[in-house]
Structure formats: C-alpha cells, structure tokens
Image (tube, rainbow, N blue to C red):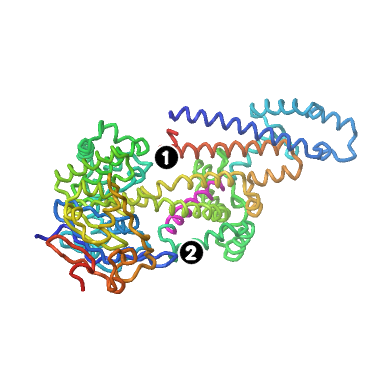
Amino acid sequence: MSSPLLEVRDLIVHFYTREGVVKALDGVMLSVGRGEIVSLVGETGSGKTVTALSIMRLLDHNARIVRGEVLFEGRNLLQLSEEEMRRIRGREISMIFQEPKSALNPVLTVGFQLREALEAHGEEGEAALEKVLSMLRRVGLPDPERLVNRYPHELSGGMAQRVMIAMALLMRPKLLIADEPTSALDVTVQAQILELIQSLVREMNTSVLFITHDLGVAAEISDRIAVMYAGVVVEQGNVYDVFEEPLHPYTRGLLAAIPRPGRELMAIEGEVPSLLNPPSGCRFHPRCPAVMEVCKRVKPRLVEVEPGRLVACHLYGGE
Amino acid sequence: MDLRAYVLRRLALTTLVLFGVLVVTFLLSHVIPADPIGAILGPQAPPELVEKLRREWGLDKPLHEQFIDYVCRAVRGDLGRSIRTNRPVLQDLLEFFPATLELATASLMLGVLVGVPLGTISALRRGSWIDHAARVFVTLGVSTPVFWLGLIMLMIFYYRLGWLPGPGRLDPYMTPPPRVTGLILLDSLLAGRLDAFYSALRHLAMPAAVLGWYAAAGIARITRSSVLEVMRREHVRTARAKGLLERIVVLRHILRNALMPIVTVIGTTYGGLLEGAVLTETIFAWPGLGRYSTGAFLYLDFMAVMGTTLFIAVIYSLVNLAVDLIYAYLDPRVRYG
C-alpha cells in the first residue's frame, strides 16, 4: 500500500480550562488514503471535532498539541510555520461545518465570501467570479448570478450547506474535512447533501474525512470507518467489516444501540467519562462487558489484526 | 426595506420624541416653585411692573395656552429671549455651540482612534501585558474625575513645563479669524490664517485630551468585549479555514461584525460630549454649551433652559438617527427586518 494522503500519529491534545486539564485526545491514530472517504464516528465529546481542528491547526488558544504528528503527503503539518499552514488551508485541505448558516459571515454577501476563498490563494478578478458561478451551478444551486448578491440569512440550511461545499471545493483540495455536515439539516435534505458530497469528491478525486455521530450516515457514505471513544480511536477498518463483525466491545455496543425493527434495543452501561480525569488503562474499561485485570492498568495500542483492520483492545493480540 | 422609507419613518419617530421632550421641559420649568420675574425685578418691585411684565411674557395665560404659544414659536425657530443676555436664545446657542462642537469632535476622534485599536488588540491578545495595560488605561479613564485630570494637566503642561497654552481657545493677543462656522480651526483655514490654526490647535490639545481619554476608555471597553464575543463565532473559523491572512480575518470577519455595539457607544459618547462638558469647559475657560446652560440654570433663565434642552434633544436625535443609518449599512439583517 502506498503512503496515505493523511496520517495522524499518536496525537495527544490537552485543553487548559478553569476546572483543570482536559485530556481531549489521547494518542489518536488515523489514516485517510487518496480518493478515500473515511468516517470518524463516535459520541458527542469523543474528540472527533478536536481531531479535525488539530489537522487544520485551528484549535482554540487554550488547547495544546502535546505530542504527535499530522502527516499530509508526508509533511508534518504540526511543524509548518503559520504562513505555510495558511497556504494549505482552503487549497489543499478544506473544511465544512455542522451549522452552515452560522459558518457563513452574516454581514457579507455569499458571492463575496466565495470569492474570498479564491482571493486567499491569489485568484482574483473576472476569472474568479466565473469560477464561483460555475461551482455554484455544480453544487446544484439555481440562478447563481442572483445568489452571489444575497446574504446568508436569506438562504435555507440546505442552500447554505451547498454554498459551504462550493466554497470548500473551489480550490479543488486534496482533502475535505466534513464535520457533521448534515446533522443540522432535515432528513430529506440530508440525503441530498450526502449524495452531492459523494458525487463531487469522486469526480475531483478528493479524499474526505467525514465526521458523524450517525452510524447510518457513516455506513452510507464511507469506504472506511474509524470509531472514537473518549479521545482514542478504538477501531478502524473497511466499513463492511466493521459493521459485519465489530471487534472492539465499544463498537459492538454502539451497533447494538441502533434501533432496528424486531430487535431489542441495547444501551451501553454507564456514562462517557470526564476527560478531566479519565479512567486509567483502557478508557473504556469501566463500561466494558469484557473487562479484564490488564485493562485497568495498561492502555491498549491500536494493532493491525488483519490487513487493514485495526483495533485497540487487550482481547486481541494483547500484551 | 427601502432605505428612504426607513429614513422617513425614523424622522417621524424623532419628531415625536422631540415633542415629548418639549412637554417635559416645559412642565418642569413651569411647575418649579421659582418666579423668574421676581428673580429679575427683585423683591421690592412695584406690583404694576410685575403685572405688566407677566402679561408681556404671556405668563398670565393658562399653562396649555402658554405651551401652544411656545411650540408655535419654537417651530419657527424662535426660542424666546434670554433674561440673562437679553438676546434671542437661538442666537446665544449658535454662538456658544461651535466651541463645544469643536471640542467634542476633537475628543471623539481621539477616543475612536485610541479606543477601537486598543480594545481590539486587548481582545485579540487577552491576558497579555498589553491587555493589562489597556485595563489600567480604561479604569483610570472612566474613574478619574475630569476636573481633577484637567487641573493636573494644566499644572504640568502649562504651569510647570510651559509646553501648552493655558485656558481659552486662542492666544489672548491674537485676532480671531473672521467668523464663518464658529469652529476656529476651520475658520482660520478658510481665512488662510495658519498662525491662528496652530494656536487654536494647541489650545484644543489639553481639553480634548482630557475628554478624549474619557471617550477612549468607554470605547475601548465596549470594543474589547464585542471583539471577544465575535471571535468565538463559527464564521471566524470558516474564514481561517479558507486560508485567509490573519489580518483580513481580524478586519473583515471580526472587527466588521463587532462594529454594531461600538458604533452605539461612539454615538452616545458623541451625544454626551456635544451636550457640553461643564467641568472641562469651566476649567479650560472654553466658551461652550456646557457653560451657557449652567449659567442659564443658575439664573433661572427659563427660556434659555428650555431652548438649550430642546437644542440638545435635537442633537441627540440626529446622532441617534446617524447611528441607526450606520446600523442599516453595517448589518443587512437590520435593513430587511
């Protein structure tokens, strides 16, 4: 296998808050291949967005990347200067967000904000406007000549997200990070947006890191899937394999918690731990049905149990 | 909404507000237990004279008739005659107001030029030494009494160091430029009198610095909190994710959105300054509205009091109108709302 487009290695991120140090990411391992759509799934607060913002280096000021590497085409993004990183944002890696309407600046027109994305990388003038209009057409927005003069509050959520997608893909980035792009939308609109993202990135051969808490959405859109729990990627693999035969006890619990007709709904016992004071060893051990003595002491590493199949659990190949 | 319709509606509202102000001032100045005629003529005045004057000024009529008379004259620009100066009140106001306008505008410019950058930087660099220094500047500016600051400045820069001239608007031996606008800076430029311009500028420096500090403190405080609030919004993250230069993110996506409350505080500050800063004007012997109105109050010069109040209300309304129009320009959601 050739080297992946993006590889996150052993990423540790802490937030310094008034209550103490929140150990938000605890050694995240993740990879996205060229042209691949990878879903990062997990509950709220499991560190999906923090992972995305660390890749973009857009974390808030109270966050510190303690350790780790973010390799993008072999270059460690965490070691670039601010100016080098700025040139990557929007051009090589771009991002769309959960709330499309608040992700747009309310006092600037749609067209202005789209052109800005080109201007940031030196493309201006008539050609830039043409590019904006054709991209708006490609994301399925009617009458782009009028749309560019409108303000975000005049758009519906679905339209705003299409604008965001157009903005993110204007520079034909190699990687698109989509942070819950459909969670705030109506179900019917959701399906359209998913389809749109899928067809556009296939066309442009753009890779996607798709963040969602919705396993159904993840199953639909992705090639591979990575499951996060309390700041750790616990399982990673082909989407069919993970859904067919989940290895990690947390993934099994998560899949059992999807309501299906004719089957009893299972909940995972206990609660998501506070990351101010996370459990020792495996962070899932207080809730794990298969907990062993070793789980309380030693943190399991993410190991490859089959080609392309990774899991961080003492039940497999464990020391 | 159409901008013209918006302005017309605002103007109509302003008229209502001004009418309200008239009612209140009129009532207040007529129900206070003080007799302006007694104040002028003294206790030994012959009753026939008192009666004559009372009739002459319409004070013998019922209150509502007096009010209607006053409003009818005020609409035509006749604000009555001042007891103290024995001149039409409007003429007095037009003579005293330019000095205040000059001082207020200079102070506001200082306040904006210092306050907005200071507030922005201290929000962007929250917790840094510059933020702490700014907080000291703001606290001192808001809490130091202006008369004290004015006296200290006069003592240091005029009396001790002699760097700046003392009270007044021009050097005493200098002939003022011909009066066109009443703003000495502008008039001296119009007359090509650079010596007068320079002298006026030096006289303006200290009172403007005193009031400017006060203005800058308020503006910096609001700017800081508004910028802090906008910095956390999601569209700022989008702007950075596009790869925009940090300078552009700050100016276009943070400061631009933070302007609404800043414009509000600039407006109210300007309104307050235009009303005339009584203490500052007194200390620096500045012949402005503040000194005129205190004089009027102390002499029970009730025509002048009502005239001044109405005048100030008009100025406040104009400033408010300007602020509202700037709002509509700044935020499309107001325009359509």
Residue displayed at 25% across by 55% down:
A40
What is the x, y in percent for residue B93?
Answer: 64, 38
Amino acid under disc 2? Ala
Task: Say few, some or many: other residues with alpha carbon within 10 Å of mark 2 (under 14 / 14 to 19 / 20 or more).
Answer: few
Q: Residue at x 21, y 40 (%)?
A: A196
Q: Decide whether residue B152 is among the magenta residues.
A: no
Q: Quadrant of the N terminus of chain A?
A: bottom left
Of residues A221 and B316, the one nearer the viewer is A221
Tell which of B240 and B273 is nearer to you. B240
Kindly indicate the quadrant of the structure image that contains residue A24: bottom left
Q: Is B121 covered by the magenta stretch?
A: yes
Q: Name the quadrant of the C terminus of chain A.
A: bottom left
- For the residues carrying marks 2 and 1, which lies nearer the camera in this image? 1
Give me the chain letter of mark 2: B
Looking at the picture, which amino acid does disc 1 mark? Asp
Q: First in sequence: mark 2 or mark 1?
A: 2
Give, as a single range, the part of the protein colored magenta.
B101-122
Residue B151 is left or right of residue B257, and the answer is right
Q: Residues within 10 Å of mark 1 (few under 14, many from 20)?
A: some
Nearest the eye: B45 or B195: B45
Residue, disc 2: B133
Q: Identify the residue position indicated by label 1 in the image.
A: B331
- Specify whether disc 2 shares its chain with disc 1: yes
Disc 2 is placed on an element classified as: helix
Q: Is residue B68 left or right of residue A18?
A: right
- Whether residue A290 is situated above or below residue B77 in the rendered picture: below
When the figure is inspected, residue B335 is found, relative to residue A74, above or below; the finding is above
**Which element type, helix, strand or loop, lies under badge 1?**
loop
* Chain containing the residue with disc 1: B
- For the question of whether residue B110 can be seen, the reply is no
Taking depth in this image into account, of B190 and A294 the one nearest to the observer is A294
